[in-house]
Structure formats: C-alpha cells, structure tokens
Amino acid sequence: MARIVVGSWMIRYPMGGNLSWTLQWLVGFQRLGHDVYLVEKAGFPSSCWDPSQGTMSDDCSYGVATINELLAHYGLQERWCFVDATDSYHGLTRREVAEVFHSADLFVDIGTHGAWLEEAAASGLRVLVDGEPGYTQMKMENRRIVGQEPPVYDYYYTNGANIGTNRSSAPNADRAWRAIFNPVVVDLFENGSPSPDSAFTTVMNWRSHAAIEFDGKVYGQKDMEFANFMELPARTTVPLEVAVAGNKVPQDRLRECGWRVRDAHQVTASYRAYKDYIRNSRGEFSVCKNVFVATNSGWFSDRSAAYLASGRPVLLEDTGFSDHLPCGRGLFAVRSVSEAAAALQEVDGNYDRHSKWARELAREHLDARVVLRKFLRQVGV
C-alpha cells in the first residue's frame, strides 16, 4: 500500500462536475488499496465560490462543509487539508499535513499550479497531471521564452494523448509528456433507462478563461467551436440541451436554433445533482475547447467519462482522442455538424445497444482500476 497525496481544487469551487473530477482520483486510488489524502490552497484572494450566495470571497465555509460531508461518505474523513487566504488550516493541521507529506510515496498534482511543491519535496515522487493540453504547454513555453522556468516535477502527465507526439501541433515546453485519461470509478454512476423525452445534454462553460496566443496564432474556448454546431438541432429530431455558464452566453440565439438551455450552476449545484443530470439525460453531445481541437491534443473529458459510465452514449467533438479510444459503439468522435447528425441518428435507432457499449467502454478503457493501476506502474509506485 502506498501513501498518495492528491493536490487539486474542490473547496474553492464546490460544484458537482468539479467535485466529481477529483473524487474519481481519490476513490480510484482508495479502491486500489492505497492511503489517500487531498490537499488544496486558496492561492489568491477571493478564490472561494459560494454557490448559495453566488459570490467569490475568502470565506471557505461552504466549500469546507461540502467536502467534509462528501469525503466522509467515501471513508476519506480527516484525510484532507485546505489552507485559506489567511494561512489558516482546515481539516488536517499544519503539523499533520507535514507528517503526511514526509511519509508519502507520491504527490499527484492535478490542479494546484505548484502550490504544494515545497511541502511535497519531502515525498517520494512528484507528478504533474495537466488537464489543459496545448494550453498548458503554450503557457509554459511562453514563460520559458522570457526566462521564467515552470515548476519542476519528477514526471509530467497530460490528458492530451497526442501531446509530445507528431500528431499534435502543441509545443512540449522541453518536457517529456506521458498520456493519461481522467479516471472514472464506474460503479459510482447509476445505469438506468432515461425517459423517452430526455435530451442529449452537456455541461459547459461558454468561455472559461482568456484565449492564448502562441507562435502568432490565437487559440480560444468552446464558444469558438460551438458556432460550427449551432444548427445541429435543425438536422435531427433528437432533443438537444446545453447546461451552460459563463459570460456573454448567446441564450436567445441558442434557443432560436432549437437548443434547450439550462443554467449549468443549477444542474451541478451538488455532486448528487450532477450525477442525476447525467442519469436523466439520453446521452451527451458536446464541443471541446478550440485549443484542444486546433492542436489535435487528444484530450478526452472526465465529464464524458461519467456519461459513459452511466450508460449514456457520447458524441464528442474530436480532439484526436479517436486515435486512442474505440469509436462507433457508444462513443462517437465528430468534426462537423453532418457527422454529429448522423451519429445521433445511429444512436437513437439503436439506443439500448449503444447504452450497453458505452458502459463497457468506460469499464475497459477509463475505469480507475485500469487507468490508475497503469499510472502507478509507470511511475514505479
């Protein structure tokens, strides 16, 4: 049994989809028999989102209460630490978390931006897992150009299966990148039949952060890619719905084109609400961030993995993941509105089979037992 510390962000943004993403790593390592801890820091002022108030502040009480209850449900109580903006410790004390790091075999940073590297220096290994392939490497390279070297880890992993290969145009920022899909603990997701009038849905941010410029080209977000699929509802009889958050969302335009529109914060207000939204969907259709698509990064969504685990077929804009995951049975990689419409017709006409294949694909290729066991073997833990 190894002692593994996972660095992420749950308390600062305690919304269902974000909670699920990190929880799969924690429970995944736990199910493999390892001793698992979560660490997180505020990082900057007013970094904590309170969905009950709709505000950002230094008050972490909502997130702390949410995580305390959620992790206790999975036997991970007293195995987390949050350091707030005043340097106060919640959960594990400063001394206790230092002791955990000193006895840890592995620190896995999936979203702390290096905030725990000083403490993690006492651990056996430090591994970065990049969740923004293409974007991360461009930021690293842009900083290297001006003499700002990125933090140093023992190994570098990315959710972009094509990063560091000739299949992707993204730079490698002078790092050797290994590929990993976000794990999903399949049996955490219910597999029931959706209602006949349920829609293909997704949860998304219209624009989650600023565009990035690299080598004279600008790379954007989902708002850029969605324009290519705006007319999809007119090409199918299958209901389509988008639960969306962010600035300048063209809700009127979306509705005019036939999309159902929901508030992403409402449908992901809790981990339970997020799972229920997926379970009540017929499947997922989603675009991907422009930077993932334009660089052919090979990125695959942890959210899409949750849909598949729930037996919900997925139609996802291809980022190059089709080079690494089997497509055409439960999962479809699409690059145009015509391909998306054809895939919807195929799934709708053979739904039960595609639903079964979706869950089988999740178990065979994305289940935490598969993904994390391989990961630990590669890093020698």
Image (tube, grey):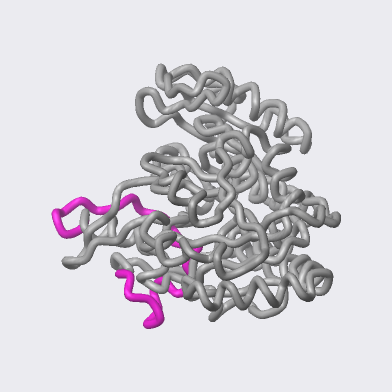
Left or right of 305? Residue 89 is left
At horizontal 55% and vertical 26% (from top left) the residue drawn is 51
Q: Can residue 219 be seen in this view?
A: yes
At horizontal 51% and vertical 53% (from top left) the residue drawn is 125
Residue 116 percent across, percent down from the top left: 44, 39
* Picture quadrant of residue 377: bottom right
Q: Is residue 158 visible?
A: no
Residue 139 percent across, percent down from the top left: 28, 55
Work out whether 243 lies above or below 75: below
Judge by depth and name the residue closer to the eye, 172 or 258.
Answer: 258
Residue 346 percent across, percent down from the top left: 70, 77
At horizontal 81% and vertical 54% (from top left) the residue drawn is 194
> Is 162 a magenta residue?
yes
Query: Which region shows up in magenta?
Result: 144-171
Work out whether 27 lies above or below 258: above
Judge by depth and name the residue closer to the eye, 263 or 149.
Answer: 263
Judge by depth and name the residue closer to the eye, 214 or 96.
Answer: 214
Of helix, strand and loop, which mostly describes the magenta segment?
loop
Work out whether 120 lies above or below 161: above
Left or right of 186? Residue 121 is left
Residue 217 percent across, percent down from the top left: 21, 66
Looking at the rendered structure, the number of numbered marks drawn on it comes to 0
Judge by depth and name the residue closer to the eye, 236 or 63.
Answer: 236
Q: In which quarter of the image is the C terminus?
A: bottom right
> Is 69 a magenta residue?
no
